Amino acid sequence: MKSQLGLVTRLQQALTEAADLHALLSGIPDWMQELHDEHSGRKTEIETLEESLAAAATDRRTAEATEADCQEKLKAYQDQISQVRNQREYGALLQEIDTVKNQIRDCEEQALAALEEYEAAEKLRNEATEAFADLDQRYSESLKKWEAEKPDIAQQAEAVKKEIQELEQALPQRILIHFRRVFERHHGNAMAAVQEVQQTGKKAAHIWHCGACNYRVRPQAVVEITNKGSLVLCDSCKRILYLAEASA
Ligand SMILES: [Zn+2]
């Protein structure tokens, strides 16, 4: 039969395994990460080019609409020429016509610039999309492979979950409560390895520390862990202490 320390050690391992499996299932496996990053990078690139395309199209439409308004204005001014009554009115009207003609020219320039921008972005977008096709193909094949691996991992996760339940049932309630509290407080790790500090000098006495908080561990506690597999808490951080060799 396993000692309480053995049970707690396995519980800690199983909880870590469960968290890792869960993270894996909701993320991307290591073997796919590089491809995934490249795929998302290229996809973002294409999206950015699509945005530039849309912006250039909007700029062009705006310039063309403004130009159309100006053309109407120009036409109205030209119609008024026959109605002017004196030189001063004629001069003012010519001034207006001149201004609106300048505006039309500006709009034409803006529309042309927007068109050129659009065409440049379109060329880049097409090139990027073409280059993306192969990557996208490889990516969806990898995704398929990963999807095929998932049920197996889900099964592992299920088995670990069952083991956790069994370990929790095998442990006395007060130990489990303490374990859970420390586990929460220390972000998913309720255990700490006891570390021996190498002494130099004439009296080579053994000195032990908590591997997590560095607080001194009594030699008697180390003996209890070694010989009986007792549950000993760090006096400072209250983590459950274990000996690295013994738990291996
Ligand atoms: Zn400690």
Image (cartoon, rainbow, N blue to C red):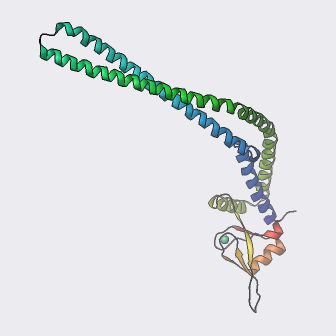
Question: Residue, x 37% and y 23% (percent of image)?
Answer: 107
In the picture as drawn, the residue positioned furthest to the right comes out as 1
Relative image position of residue 13 (x, y in whole percent): 77, 58
Name the image quarter holding residue 15.
Answer: bottom right
The vertical placement of 172 against 47, above or below, is below
Residue 163 vs 88, above or below: the answer is below
The residue that appears at 74% across and 85% down in the rendered structure is 199
Give residue 39's quadrant in the image: top right
Q: x%, y% of residue 240? A: 72, 67
237 relative to 82 in the view: left or right:
right
Q: Residue at x 81, y 64 (%)?
A: 6
Q: Quadrant of ligand 1?
A: bottom right
Residue 149 percent coordinates (x, y): 81, 39
Give 203 or 168, whichever is nearer the viewer. 203
Of residues 125 and 148, the one drawn nearer to the viewer in this rendering: 125
Q: Quadrant of the N terminus?
A: bottom right
Q: How many marks?
A: 0
Which is more toward the observer, 92 or 70? 92
Residue 226 shown left or right of residue 114 in the figure: right
Q: Residue at x 74, y 87 (%)?
A: 200
Q: Residue furthest top?
A: 82
| Image coordinates for residue 16, horizontal then vertical, percent | 73, 55
Q: Residue pushed farthest bottom?
A: 202
| Residue 83 falls in image quadrant | top left
Residue 36 as seen in the image, left or right of residue 124: right
Quadrant, the C terminus: bottom right
Tell me if residue 109 comes above or below residue 39 in the rendering: above
